[in-house]
């Protein structure tokens, strides 16, 4: 195993180990502070981060306004307060020399306001902004305003080239590194392009090499690339370490820090991680963002899969094979199905899936009355946590604050379930019915001898273990 030496990143020497940012409320100031204290770059999530009352208790993010626009403003205020609170905690733990980054999802609701409000309120406490899930063209401009380094997350050389040519070349001095996030292996939202097959993963080495070759044409040969997604044992990544073809490379760990003593996730989630098998993490397309995402294939994901499978196309008028009448909703509106699809619908109805919900793609999905009511309620409670949401049809852009499409019942309220699993899932049953993000290597918790007999390390112990190559 090659030695793991410090590299220069963001203007200072740090271990080439970066904590992956995980929102909502999973990568906290505590985890980031301890990771930074161990010598790497800690990362707190600024996505719906927790703030605290005068007694140090988490402030529940409860929305009081009657409409989505006003709830969206409440969400932004929560986000700014939470980001500042987590930055202060991280700094207190890491000390004056620890490197603390904040991770922001560009497509979250009010992302620019939250980034700027957090950096304004936590001056000097955050040393870098990591940002993905979208094309954050204004990230360099914001970083320059507050004199912090920035770390865009991309999944291809092409994506970085577009960002550089349009915007980042104007703030080149503050580009601390480029995160290459493997779109087939990373947890959370994944950057698969329309031309890439989700079922056919590509080797990361040639993709990272292509990124470095492009970066060299921009004069960025010494700017670190941070390899993210699929990293478990560093001895498996020796060809990336001190490789002159690739230049300086750091490694981001998102999944392994979930299972530490400082990790805020509940015991039920931690126990579930120790039982996962290969293939238990599912790359799916259910997220209301419209991106692919990776999550544990638990009851929550399985219900979404089944909901999407109970789907038929309809026509508002009889046309072609769509010549069988079917009535939908309380007003018994008539639509037209094919005879084979009507047979399928009758089977689903007999199984209790009696409520038909329209999708934006002229299809119907079939769910139970209880699930239909939950979907409608969740859509009505939207607080604009995304810049645009296919589940609720919210959009922060434009005068009417909608996407212009029907709300899509094939998706889900991501804010609701992530808040639930972060704060209220005390039992395995509760965790099983909420979204559980994870990288695809999470099954290795069960076989890695480091975690034998249910051992859960501290962040410091984890970093020390990683430095051995394992």
Image (cartoon, rainbow, N blue to C red):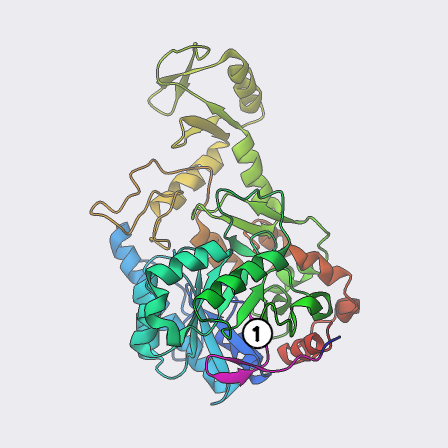
Is 341 drawn above or below residue 371 in the view shown? Answer: above
Badge count: 1
Is 205 drawn above or below residue 242 in the view shown? Answer: above
82 or 224: nearer the viewer: 224
Report whether 39 appears left or right of 58: right
221 or 237: nearer the viewer: 221
Q: Is residue 125 magenta?
A: no
Q: Name the element at disc 1.
A: loop
On the question of residue 423 being in view, the answer is no
Picture residue at 36% right of the left edge, 60% below the top? 165
Estimate the x, y position of residue 136 in percent, counting from the top left.
37, 60
On the question of residue 201 being in view, the answer is yes
- Residues in magenta, as a range: 3-19
The residue at the far front in this view is 217
Is 463 drawn above or below residue 280 in the view shown? Answer: below
Picture residue at 68% right of the left edge, 65% below the top? 232
Dividing the picture into quadrants, the one containing residue 81 is: bottom left
Dividing the picture into quadrants, the one containing residue 268 is: bottom right
Report whether 34 appears left or right of 48: right
Estimate the x, y position of residue 328 in percent, counting from the top left.
39, 22
Estimate the x, y position of residue 312 in percent, counting from the top left.
49, 24
52 or 250: nearer the viewer: 250
Estimate the x, y position of residue 62 in percent, counting from the top left.
36, 60
Report whether 178 appears left or right of 5: left
Q: Quadrant of the N terminus?
A: bottom right
Is 157 drawn above or below residue 246 in the view shown? Answer: above
Q: Residues within 10 Å of mark 1 (few under 14, many from 20)?
A: many
Q: Is residue 18 magenta?
A: yes
Q: Quadrant of the C terminus?
A: bottom right
- For mark 1, what is the residue? 248
Dividing the picture into quadrants, the one containing residue 361 is: top left
């Amino acid at each position: 195993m090659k030695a793991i030496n410090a590299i220069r990143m963001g203007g200072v020497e740090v271990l080439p180990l970066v904590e992956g940012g995980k929102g909502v409320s999973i990568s906290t100031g505590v985890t980031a502070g301890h990771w930074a204290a161990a010598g790497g770059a800690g990362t707190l999530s600024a996505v719906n981060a927790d703030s605290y009352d005068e007694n140090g208790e988490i402030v529940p993010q409860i929305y009081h306004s009657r409409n989505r626009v006003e709830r969206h403003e409440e969400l932004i205020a929560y986000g700014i307060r939470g980001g500042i609170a987590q930055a202060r905690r991280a700094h207190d733990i890491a000390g004056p020399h620890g490197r603390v980054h904040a991770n922001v999802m560009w497509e979250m609701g009010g992302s620019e306001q939250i980034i700027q409000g957090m950096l304004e309120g936590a001056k000097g406490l955050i040393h870098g902004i990591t940002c993905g899930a979208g094309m954050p063209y204004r990230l360099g401009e914001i970083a320059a305003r507050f004199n912090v380094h920035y770390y865009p997350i991309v999944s291809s050389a092409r994506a970085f080239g577009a960002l550089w040519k349009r915007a980042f070349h104007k703030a080149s001095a503050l580009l601390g590194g480029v995160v290459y996030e493997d779109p087939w292996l990373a947890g959370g939202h994944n950057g698969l392009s329309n031309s890439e097959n989700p079922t056919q993963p590509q080797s990361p080495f040639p993709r990272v090499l292509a990124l470095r070759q492009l970066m060299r044409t921009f004069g960025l040969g010494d700017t670190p690339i941070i390899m993210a997604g699929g990293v478990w044992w560093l001895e498996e990544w020796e060809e990336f370490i001190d490789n002159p073809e690739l230049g300086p490379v750091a490694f981001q760990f998102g999944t392994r820090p979930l299972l530490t003593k400082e990790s805020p996730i509940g015991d039920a989630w931690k126990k579930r991680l120790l039982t996962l098998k290969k293939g238990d993490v599912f790359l799916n397309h259910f997220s209301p963002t419209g991106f692919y995402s990776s999550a544990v294939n638990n009851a929550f994901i399985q219900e979404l899969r089944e909901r999407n499978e109970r789907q038929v196309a309809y026509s508002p008028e009889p046309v072609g094979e769509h010549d069988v009448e079917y009535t939908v909703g309380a007003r018994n509106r008539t639509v037209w199905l094919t005879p084979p699809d009507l047979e399928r619908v009758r089977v689903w109805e007999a199984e209790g899936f009696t409520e038909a919900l329209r999708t934006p793609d002229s299809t119907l999905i079939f769910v139970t009355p209880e699930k239909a009511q939950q979907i409608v309620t969740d859509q009505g409670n939207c607080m604009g946590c995304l810049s645009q949401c296919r589940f609720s049809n919210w959009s922060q852009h434009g005068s009417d604050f909608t996407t212009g499409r029907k709300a899509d019942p094939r998706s889900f309220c991501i804010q609701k379930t992530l808040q639930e699993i972060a704060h209220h899932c005390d039992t395995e049953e509760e965790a099983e019915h909420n979204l559980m993000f994870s990288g695809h290597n999470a099954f290795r918790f069960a076989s890695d001898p480091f975690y034998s007999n249910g051992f859960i390390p501290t962040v410091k112990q984890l970093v020390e273990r990683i430095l051995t190559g394992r």
